[in-house]
Image (cartoon, rainbow, N blue to C red):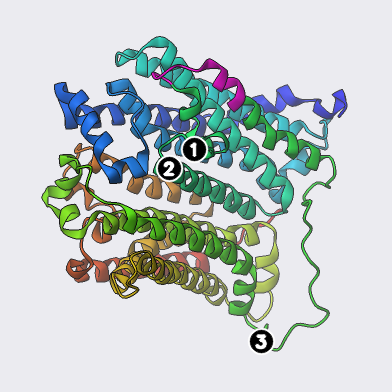
Amino acid sequence: MKSNDFTGTGALIRLFLRRDRFLLPLWIIFSVMLVFVTAVTFTAIGGENLGYVMSEFNKDPLISALLGPAISIDLSGAIVWRGVSQMALALGTGSLLIVIRHTRTDEETGRSELIRAYPIGRHTNLTAALILTIMGNMIAGLLIALSVIALGGDAKGAFIFGGTLSTIGCFYAGIGALGVQLRESSSTARSLGIAALGLGLVMAILNNFGGGYTLLRWITPMAWQRVTGPFAGNHGWGLLYCGVFAAMPAIIAYKLSAGRDLGAGVLSASPGLPEASPGFSSPLALAWRLHQKNFIGWLVGIVLYIAAFAAISPGLSSDGGMSNWLSSLGGTSWSQEAGLGYVFISVSIYLMSLFVAAYAMTAVLRMKKEENEGRVEMLLDKHVSRIRWMSSHLIVTAGCSAALLLVMGIVGGFFYGLASENVSNGFWSILIMSVSKLPPVLILLGVTALLYGLWPKITMLGWGVWISSVMLELAWEGQMIDWSFMRISPFAYTHYTIDVSNLPLMPLFFLLCISAILTATGLLGFRNRDILTKS
């Protein structure tokens, strides 16, 4: 690298700051608010008896399998223990989206080409995006530390906790930068980033299942609090290790960036056949071709995820006692009636269904990429109607989402049965449990289709609906809201606390109807609006 490769970085940082003057503060504030949400949650659960409640949680085999042993039994330790995954997920998601937006998305829309008409270095875009994101993570980490101190936490532990979260966010900023270099698609980069987040959560849970201090904690950013030990040893040297590890994806991204052309990827797209096959003759076939590789990647990831968690579920037992909070969650004794292993697989499927909804949203957004790159305009110049083109993508997306849930149910039921030495044990219940998540997933698909059809420039608002569903779940688990408010989330109607024999069929039918209305409205909006082009 040469010094002139970074010419104009300061000017681009100011430009990116102006473009993100609303998004960046919201991302930071949202991450900090999770500290107070977690604190209010444990205050509501434990009150003055928080130490006793935390000790009871430590004895609960299911909670220990999901979250690992508690860091410490005071409020600060509870914030780290329960809130680190949510805060890391928020910072990681924001870091990915911001880096991809200012690099690959700008290349797709032609903005980078316009910027490079000025005296700009080769690595300026990437450097400015990374610096902006690192600054955001550092500010978020500082505010999180100050928030924990304001809640009574030790200053040293609070700053180590904030620094740990900052390095996690910076790691995923590097993952976003690395994904940008690999392929020429921003949707592919986002999918890779989301897959990395999902893999991190899975590895963190597996680390927790092994007691919290396995080898996985060194290579899993979501478990780095076990390395730095905030409020439990305060290992400052751990921050140095996390910082070095977090820098590795960004360093690789710079190396790859030097060897690719603007708008291209290191892994170039394979050339097509000289002649199309007879079946490749419709918009539906084209849509499947575009979504195929992404779907296969998600399919492999889900199979590995559910096979691992289904295999270990029957091994859980409640011999160590079950916390009153868990057993009475939702006002019923659902967990004791179902059995701890069955509850674990239920929670695992519920969590993955949220990611399947994210997959559906990113698949719908593939249409926006096709439109921005001018390929939609070329297709519509032929004998292809707008409705037919968009509906083809939506059909493929809905079919792929349903297939992911179906395979998750089949594989989960099969491995659960093998582990319990009775394949028929719970197979159909687990299958129905997984497939029943389709209506809420289609709601998120419909919301994204609606925004794309009517207001394509604000399709990112669809992620607000997804995040709201996650936040409602956290607030309900923390007893901050009751079930009547939780029902705003479409996932409440297939919640893990609802037995499959008691699924509310009529509300699920209404969800399907609402998703159909949202999708149809998006189709009509797309038929009547102008097509976006690079020009």
Determine the image quadrant of residue 85.
Answer: top left
Q: Are marks 3 and 1 in contact (CB under 8 Å)?
A: no
Residue for badge 3: 279
Mark 3 or mark 1, earlier in chain? 1
Q: Secondary structure at mark 1?
A: loop
Q: Is residue 236 magenta?
A: yes
**Marker count (numbered):** 3
Q: Which residues are magenta?
A: 230-242
- Residue type at mark 2: give it: Gly
Q: Is residue 241 left or right of residue 482?
A: right
Residue for badge 2: 210
Q: Measure the C-alpha gap from mark 3 to mark 1.
A: 50 Å
Q: Measure the C-alpha gap from mark 1 to mark 2.
A: 6 Å
- Residue type at mark 1: give it: Thr
Residue 437 position (above or below residue 216): below
Q: Is residue 520 left or right of residue 126?
A: left
Q: Secondary structure at mark 3?
A: loop
Q: Which percent across, then down, holds residue 112?
A: 74, 41
Residue for badge 1: 214
Q: Secondary structure at mark 2?
A: loop
